[in-house]
Image (tube, coloured by chain):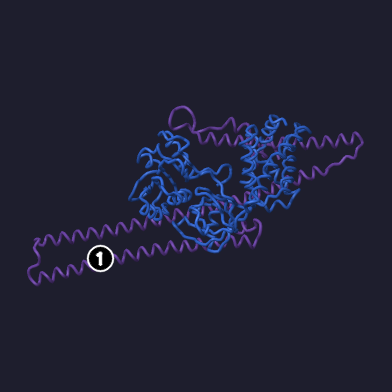
Amino acid sequence: MDIERLKSNFARIAMHGDEVPLHFYSDLFLKHPETRPMFPVSMQAQRAHLVDALATIVSSADNADNLAGFLRDLGRGHRKFGALTAHYHAVGESLLATFAHFSGDSWDAELAADWLAAYELIAGIMTAAALEDEQDHPAYWTGTVVGREWKAFDIVILTVRTEPRLEYLPGQSVAVESPARPRLWRYYSIANAPRPDGSVDFHVRLVDGGAVSMALIAATSIGAELKLGPPVGVLRLDTASGRDVVMVAGSTGLAPLKAMLEQAAGLRQPPRVHFFFGARHADGLYDLSTLEKMAAEHPWLTVVPTVSDGRFEGEAGPVADVVMRQGSWSGRDAYIAGPTELVTDMAARLGAAGMPVTQIHVEDFGWSEP
Amino acid sequence: MTTDAWYDEQRRMTPDHVLAVTFPPTRWSRHGFEEEPVRAFLADVHAEMVRLINERSSLWQEVQRLRRRILGKETGNDAILFGKDDAHIHAVRILSSAQRTADRYVADAQAYSGRLTEEARARRDEIMGQAQHHADLLLEEARTRARAAAVDAMDHDGLPPQTDQERRAVQAELAYLRTFSEVYRQHLRIYTEDVLRTIEDWEGKERAAAREIPLAAHQQPGIGWLHSG
């Protein structure tokens, strides 16, 4: 297999932009109409995902280990969409037809054979991972909403009980699908450590124009059923480090950190935790009372609420500024979750202040849409 | 239609556009341009190049098809004007353009819903701000009056009331102040409740509206409901 030739061919194909995934999906849906219901009405985000995934695969073709890990996750992740082995053949056929279409006169039998071999390799890893996963886990978990609490005018905490029980680690998140918005999956962090009854909390913030958050907030009542994908994410509490901890949460970035806080409370010797919770306005500190209750119960926990705009009897300013003002944290482990700008900015500033990169843990959803 | 008219109608970029484009100078120094407009222009140029590449590719495929047809005639084979493969490619194009239309409708609906919630959020902030301001004013006024009353009392030579008449006068004043504070508290309460009711009304309406959306989607499958909204 001539990988360099495949790469340069892909670069040529990619020049056609959105036409490429558009052609691919049209070809697939015409040849295999049964695959259309697996996708949402609007395919815009879907097409971008396909191009991103292909670009990742092609660019990391030389790094077999990384690529295999990526493909295994992709294979497992596709189970919740209802992808079966038969679909992989259909996809391969349409992908090759699409590549041939956009390659023009540079397409030949050799290139076709190379792409086919590459695709079979990729599909092989993905389907093997999916089959392996099938032994232990369902394709998705069915969750029933058992609790629903307005915390601020635009934030609701949903408590969901799953069938079967969802096993996860505090800090992880799952993709959620609402029956009101079929085939649109969005990632939400689980906001609690595992409970005896297996229920999980999601902190849902209404995103202006956000199709899924709108459905979860407005059209989800007690008893409603949601689909949950397998737990993903690399944010974990390092319980073996022996270091104290600083946590920084912006808005609903509180969710994964709160789960880890509950986990810490269950440890025999919890680390000292300094918890910064930031929002623009005071009413954005939606679950502060729970945090303060925890702090009153646990002497190892200090909670610092901060507000950047408007009136507040507490720390004022962007949360990252307050964190840097309040001391030197480089001897601690840092956990950061929230809006991307906050996470990147905070991590960079802690790093610049001398905290080793290995001690900075942030939420990362990878290629998929949060 | 002339080529120029076609370009105008399609709002396509022409070489002249690229030569004639101007950018606002940067505010920070005498040299260079504002970054945003330059990036936006580059994005337009990129989009136009992708479009040209795709058009060229379609034309190239059309040329190939016609060439095959002519060659087929020359060699005496069954020349077909429109083969099975051509039909498939045409079907792919039609489906692709239908998909684009669907994407646009969904994006429009989403943008509209985004605008609605954004406006609602702004309106809420405004109502809350006004309420806060009003409450502050009422409190401040009450405080001023209380201070004035206290000063008045002090001005009464600072001595406790001596005669029955003085005592009665002070008691009357006290009663007045109590009533005054009661009335103000009442005022504040009514005002706050009124503001809360407005917000609840508005929330109720929003929620009712939000509940109707999935119902409508259910009754009219596909994207039809987007037109009716």
Q: What amino acid type should be assigned to the residue bearing mark 1?
A: Ser
Q: Quadrant of the N terminus of chain A?
A: top right
- With respect to residue A67, does B215 lie above or below? below
- With respect to residue A110, does A141 lie above or below? below
Q: Residue A143: percent from the left, percent from the top? A: 57, 58
Tell me: B170 left or right of B141. Answer: left
Q: Residue A329: percent from the left, percent from the top? A: 39, 38
**Residue at 17% in and 60% down:** B150
Front in this rendered view, residue A205 or B182: A205
Q: Which chain is blue?
A: A
Tell me: A319 left or right of A173. Answer: left
Front in this rendered view, residue A72 or A26: A72
Tell me: B111 left or right of B154. Answer: right
Task: Place residue A127 in its image quadrant.
Answer: top right
Q: Residue A225: percent from the left, percent from the top? A: 58, 60
Q: How many marks?
A: 1
Front in this rendered view, residue A336 or A285: A336
Q: Chain of mark 1?
A: B
- With respect to residue B22, does A252 lie above or below? below
Q: Which chain is purple?
A: B
**Residue at 13% in and 69% down:** B169
Q: Residue B198: percent from the left, percent from the top? A: 42, 63
Look at the image and tell me whether residue A278 can be seen.
no
SS for callout 1: helix
Q: Find disc 1 in the rendering and name its residue.
A: B181
